[in-house]
Image (cartoon, rainbow, N blue to C red):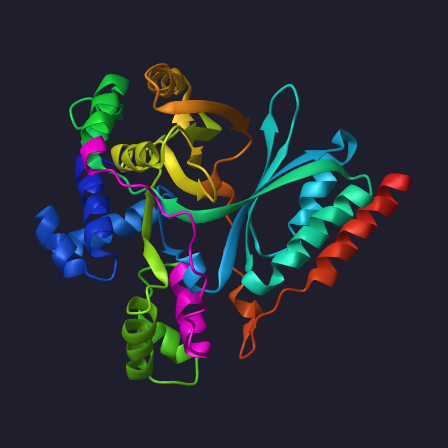
Amino acid sequence: MARKGYDYLDVKIVDGLYKFTPRKFRKIAEFSKIPESTLRHRINKLLSQHLLKMSINPKYQNLGLLTAVVKLDYAPEVGEELIEAMRVNPFALFIDRTFSEKPYIHAVYAVPIESEKFLIYYLDRMVDLDLIYNYELERVVHLHRNSLDSQYYNPETKTWGFDEEALYQRFVNMLNQAKAPETEVKIINRIKDEYDIIILSALEKFSDVKLTEVAEETDTTVQNLHYHYHRHILENDVIEQYINHLKIFYNQPVLHPLFQIEFEKGEYLDAFMKAVEGLYIIEYNAVLLGGSRLIQFATVQNTLLMNYMRLLEKMQANGYIKNFKHYLMQNSFEEAKSMLPYDAYSETGWNYMDEVYVEKIRELKKLRRR
């Protein structure tokens, strides 16, 4: 009978993928203490069962992109159509609705820095057309994919879990190493040429892609692609890290909360980020510009959501957190995240076709009149 799901060895393999990147199978095999052939077989099995997703996390600011989180207060009768219209904009990484008394749409954009005014114009047009009542736009200093840590996996029970008291103690311990997070990030386009774009696009689809395969589809050599990968992609720090996303909640009911947390000090935010590093329920941490504010995209089992809420409540009671809110989303960030539109890049940089996106919104207004 074929094995279903994953076991502790698979969890160790994902640990190795994060430590050494999917492009270093020999080191991962040594780390997990299994033959390289078995390693490849297990990874392929996890991929075929849709339990593992391998990709990259681009360093958006080094691709010349401004990252922003937008919260829309929208007209309920056009909710679904509005989301579909917004998805025409390929620079929208994530769009989803909340479940709450007052529903909102949350979106994450990574737009060319020189096109920030067009994003604002795009949102303003939605207000003018009475599709949304208002919006809040927050610039993101840092959008970071949280890596999985196997310490939260119990091999005996084959389950994932966390202790909020232990997490709180870890936060307190981290305060000694804490420093105020960056409040501004320099946005510089470090993409050198079209070959960088070809490699980034291939890696974001599948991070273990062989450059020989990419070379076969392009008019260049493997040596040239290796040069670009090492001298442009790695040295110019355009990849934040590799993403090896194991489907933790296999066939289990989950919730998708979005947390908005404001800390009393920047040092507290930094210590908290270090404390929750590796916590499997956190998908992305987004540090907002100005103040000490954090947005977390999470996927958590129903029974564990209250554990995490108790952790935040304790930190608030002890003066570390000023306030926090949470919203339940329809989908997780990982499920709904879109790939960057690499085909929109040319010698002149990123092509942001704002008129196309605005026209789609105008069409939605016509539909509403009917």
Q: Residue at x 24, y 62 (%)?
A: 23
Quadrant housing the N terminus: top left
Quarter residue 178 falls in: top left
Near-viewer residue (266 or 190): 266
Asked if residue 73 lies left or right of residue 190, the reply is: right
Residue 65 visible somewhere in the drawing: yes
Q: Position of residue 345 (x, y in %)?
A: 54, 71
Near-viewer residue (6 or 361): 361
Quarter residue 162 falls in: top left
Residue 205 visible somewhere in the drawing: no
Magenta stretch encompasses residue 52: no
- Image height check: is 53 above or below 323? below
Asked if residue 111 lies left or right of residue 4, the reply is: right
Quadrant housing the C terminus: top right
Magenta stretch encompasses residue 186: yes
Magenta segment range? 175-204
Q: Residue at x 27, y 41 (%)?
A: 179
Near-viewer residue (216 or 355): 355
Q: Residue at x 47, y 42 (%)?
A: 290
Quarter residue 312 falls in: top left
Q: Position of residue 82 (x, y in %)?
A: 72, 42
Q: Residue furthest right?
A: 370
Q: Position of residue 354 (x, y in %)?
A: 69, 61
Q: Position of residue 171 (x, y in %)?
A: 24, 28
The number of discs equals 0
